[in-house]
Image (spheres, grey):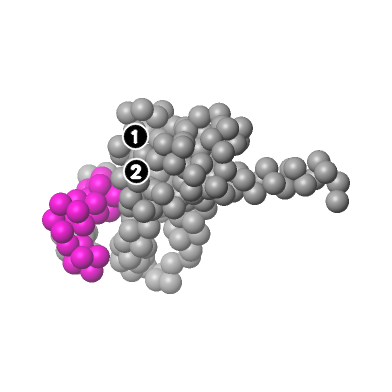
Amino acid sequence: MNEPDGRRRRGQDNRARIVEAMLELVQAGDVAPVAEVVAARADVGLRTVFRHFKDMDSLYGEMSAAVDTEVRALVERPYTADKWRGQLSELVDRRAVLFEKIAPFRQASERLRGRSAFIAGEQVRMAMILRDILRQIIPMEMGTENFEALDLVLSYEAWARLRREQNLSVEEAKVVIRRVILGITG
């Protein structure tokens, strides 16, 4: 085997292990793991972390890209319903799965938002993606105010409040969201 190819492969493996370690730590509840903890979890040296990532923000970026790939697979599936009300109901189910999956990452990003321009930008970007998905479902005649109300009730922030502060189960939270949606859409 050619030595430069072996070094390149080891470098790629180390980078992937670092990102995986970061994902595992955040999923386990460490919302702001420090580089030393990430290095230990990935079983690499601290210098190796910073050889692959210039700072923790760039590591958050790589973690975000990995999560984004999973999120896109979930949200870009075609709807089974052909009418917008059915699609909206499917959207509630999809967002429940999505928000449960990203909750640890979102909690981490909420804590770090003020210190990381990247993370703040990612939260805005995700909100815009979710708005665009909703906009594709809701007929224009629903009006701006109804669209904004639906966007609010279908947001991560509403979901997090129902799940964390109001301590509802996933199914209970979906019932509440559907009830509010019915009030908005008639």
Q: Is residue 61 visible?
A: no
Q: Is residue 79 above or below residue 119?
A: below
* Position of residue 17 in the picture relative to residue 11 (left or right): left
User: Residue at 51% of width from left, 51% of height from top?
Assistant: 20
Q: Is residue 52 visible?
A: yes
Q: Is residue 115 above or below residue 9?
A: above
Residue 30 percent location from the top left of the image: 35, 46
Location of residue 14 by image quarter:
top right
Look at mark 2 in the image and give the residue it sits on: 31
Secondary structure found at label 1 = helix
Q: Amino acid at mark 2?
A: Val
Look at mark 1 in the image and give the residue it sits on: 112
Mark closer to the chain start, 1 or 2: 2
Residue 164 percent location from the top left of the image: 19, 53
Q: Amino acid at mark 1?
A: Leu
User: Residue at 21% of width from left, 57% of height from top?
Assistant: 163
* Position of residue 96 in the picture relative to residue 145 (left or right): right
Q: Is residue 159 magenta?
A: yes
Residues marked 1 and 2 touching at CB (< 8 Å): yes
Secondary structure found at label 2 = loop
- Gap in angstroms between the C-alphas marked 1 and 2: 8 Å
User: Residue at 13% of width from left, 56% of height from top?
Assistant: 166
Q: Which residues are magenta?
A: 147-173
Location of residue 111 by image quarter:
top left
User: Residue at 32% of width from left, 28% of height from top?
Assistant: 114
